[in-house]
Image (cartoon, rainbow, N blue to C red):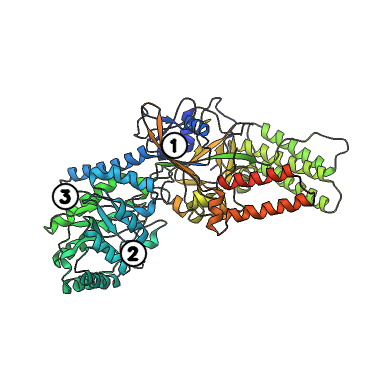
Amino acid sequence: MNQSPHTNHEKTTWTIKDSAELYGLERWGDNYFSINDAGNINVNPQGSKENSLDLTHLLDELKDRNLTPPLLLRFDDILEDRLKKLHHAFEDAIHKYDYKNRYQGVFPIKCNQQRHVIEEIIAIGKQWNFGLEAGSKAELLIALSMIDNPEALIICNGYKDNRYIETSILARQLKKKPIVVIEQLNEVQGIISASKHLNAAPLIGIRAKLSSQSSGKWEASTGDKSKFGLSIPEILHAVNLLKDSGLLDELILLHFHLGSQINDISVLKNALQEAGQIYIELKRLGAPMGYLDVGGGLGIDYDGSRTATAASTNYSLQNYANDVVATIQECCKTNQIEVPRLITESGRNICSHFSILIFNILGTSSVPIDIPKRTNNEYLIVENLRDTLNALDDICAKSKLDVSKLQEAWNDALKFKEDALAAFRLGFIDLTTRATAEQLTWACAKKITSNLSNTTLIPEELKALNSALAATYYANISIFRSAPDTWAINQLFPIMPIHRLNERPCKLGHFADLTCDSDGKFTQFINNGNIKNLLELHEMKPGKNYWVGMFLGGAYQEIMGNLHNLFGSTNAIHIRLTQKGRYKLKHVVKGNTKRDVLHAVEYNSEQLLEKLRIATESAIQHKTLNINDAQRFIEHIEISLRKSTYLQE
Ligand SMILES: *Cc1c(COP(=O)(O)O)cnc(C)c1O
C-alpha cells in the first residue's frame, strides 16, 4: 500500500471529513470524539455533539492556568458513560433472554489504581452495586477501604498468603463482601487453617484453569499451561478439602479469566460453555454457588477495523453481553439449575477511552530536499546527480509513468551518492560538495515518491523511499512513562493531531520521544486493520504549537510506565463537562517534579543543591564566576527541582 499523501490527482480542498477518514476517528472513537468546523477535535462524553468540548480551546485555557503539555486529560463523563454502556448491555441481554438473575460487575484495580479514578468508579457504580477486584495485597487495601457499600463485591484474586486470607475473613465482619478466590491449591489449606484460627469463614470462589484457549497477545495466559487457576482434578480436590473441613457452604463463586483483549468472540463462547459445565458440576457436588465471574478480557477496537486482529475485536459490547447471558442460560436450563448472578471484571473496556495523552511537538527533522544552486566548475559527481534529477523530470512528465525507468534513475542516484562519500573519505571533495550531493540525492527521492501514487506496481525499494524521506517529529514525552505498551508489546493506540484537521497533512512522519533511547519512539500507527509506519502530519508553523493526542490509553499505561531517563509522570487533569461547551477541572494531579524522580533513586535534592552552592563559592573565590551568575545558576537549579521533568515552553 502506498502511503504518500501526494498524488497527481490531489483534490484541491481538504475537509474535516477527509481527516476523520484518514485517522479513522469515527471507527475507533465510539462517538466520544468528533472534528468541529474549526478543524479541532471535540470531546463528546455522552456521544452527543450537543454537549461537547473543543480540546484545543481547553488546552488554551489550561495554558492560562500554567498547565501545559504533556498532559493527561481524564474525562470522567466518558468513564461514566462506559459504565452505563456496560450495565445497559447486560440489562438488555438479561431482558432479551429472560435471564432470571442479575449482572453485578467489578472493576479490576490493576487497570488503573489512581485514587481519583477508583473514587469516580465507585461513586458512579453505586447504583448498580458495582465492586472492585484486587490482585495483590496492596490492591486489597484499596478495595477494602474504598468500598462502603455492603452489597458491592470485592473479588480477592492473586496469590495469597496467610495475612491476605485472614484480612479477607475479618473484613467480612465489617459488613464488606470480599470473596476469596482460590488461585492455587495450597491456598485451600491456608483458608482452612485461617478459618479455624479465627473461628470464622470467608466467602470462597475458585478460579478454573480452562482448556479453552484465547488468541492474540495474551494467548499464553489461558489454557492448560496457564500460570493461574486450578485444573479440573485440583478443583475436585479443593472441593473435597473444603467439604471435609465444613467450608463447602461458603463456596459461592466460579471464576475464570481468558486473558486481556479477547479479539475473537468464538474463543469466549467455548470458554463460557466449559465454565458453565464446571459451575453445574460444583453445584452438584454440594456447593451453594450463586455467582459466575467471567473475568476481564472485553476488548477495545483500537484501530476500528472490527476484526479478530490484535488491535481490534470482532464483536461489540452487546454481542459480548448477549453471549455471556445466552450461553450460561442455555447451560443451566439444560441441567435445570438456577442461573447464577453474572460478574465481569472488565478493566480495559471501562477505562481506556476516558483519558487522552496530549503532547506538543518540539520540532521536526527531515532530510533536506531543496535543490542547491549551481556553482561554477561543479564536480562530476554533482553534475551526474543534476543530470539524474533532470532525467527524472522527463520520466515523470510522460503521460504513462515507466516505473522501471524510475528505478533505474534511483539506482544511479544512489551510486553517485556513494561515489561522493568515497571521494569525501579520500579528501577529493569538501564538506559543501558532499552536502550538495546528498541534497540532490534526496531531491531525486522526493521527485520519485511524489509521482508514485499513480502506478500500482511499485518495486519494494522504491516504496521504502517514503520512509527514508519521512520527518521525525520530536515529542515532549517519554513513551516509557506514558505509553509503555507501545514499546513492550507493540500495542497500537490511535494517535493524531488534535487541531488543524481542516488542513491537508502534507508530511509523513513518526515520533521520537525525549529519552536517549533508540526505542523511544512511535513508529507504528493504526491503519484500519493493518499497521503503517508513517503518519500523515502537518508542517509545523513557526511560533505555533502543534498538539498531538494519543487516545484510548487509559488502561494500564500509567502504572506500567517507568522512570527511564528520569522522566516522571505528567500532570493529569480530571475534567467534568458542565453546560454547553463549559467544563470544570475537578482535580489537578501534579506530575512528578525533578525532586521527586531524584528522590526515587535515593538522591536528596537539598544535598545536591548544597554541593552546587559550594562549587559556586569556590568558583567565585577563583574568579571564574561572578556572584550574579552564581546566583542565576543556583536559581535555575532551585526552580528546576520544583518543576516537571519535561521541556517547558
Ligand atoms: C487483568 C485482569 C482483569 C482485567 O482484564 P481486562 O482485559 O483489562 O478487562 C480481570 N481479571 C483478572 C483476574 C485479571 O488478571
Could you tell me which secondary element the residue under label 2 belongs to?
loop
- Residue 604 seen in this snapshot: yes
Quadrant of the frame with the C terminus: top right
- 509 or 90: which is nearer to us? 90
The residue carrying mark 3 has its beta carbon less than 8 Å from ligand 1: no
Ligand 1's quadrant is bottom left
Taking the spot 64% from the left edge, 44% from the top edge, the residue there is 636
Q: Quadrant of residue 94?
A: top left
Which residue bears the numbered disc 3?
101
Asked whether residue 275 is in view, the answer is no
Disc 3 or 2, which lies upstream in sequence?
Answer: 3
Marks 3 and 1, the one that precedes in the sequence: 1
| Dot 3 crowding, Cα within 10 Å, few <14, some 14–19, many 20+ | some
**On the picture, is 313 further left or further right than 478?**
left
> Residue 147 bears which disc, if any?
none
Q: Find residue 188 and report its horizontal and vertical position in percent.
A: 25, 71
The residue that mark 2 highlights is: 223
Q: Label 3 sits on what residue type?
A: Asn
Q: Nearer the viewer, residue 183 or 522?
A: 183
Q: Secondary structure at mark 3?
A: loop
Q: Is residue 159 above or below residue 29?
A: below
The residue indicated by pointer 1 is 25
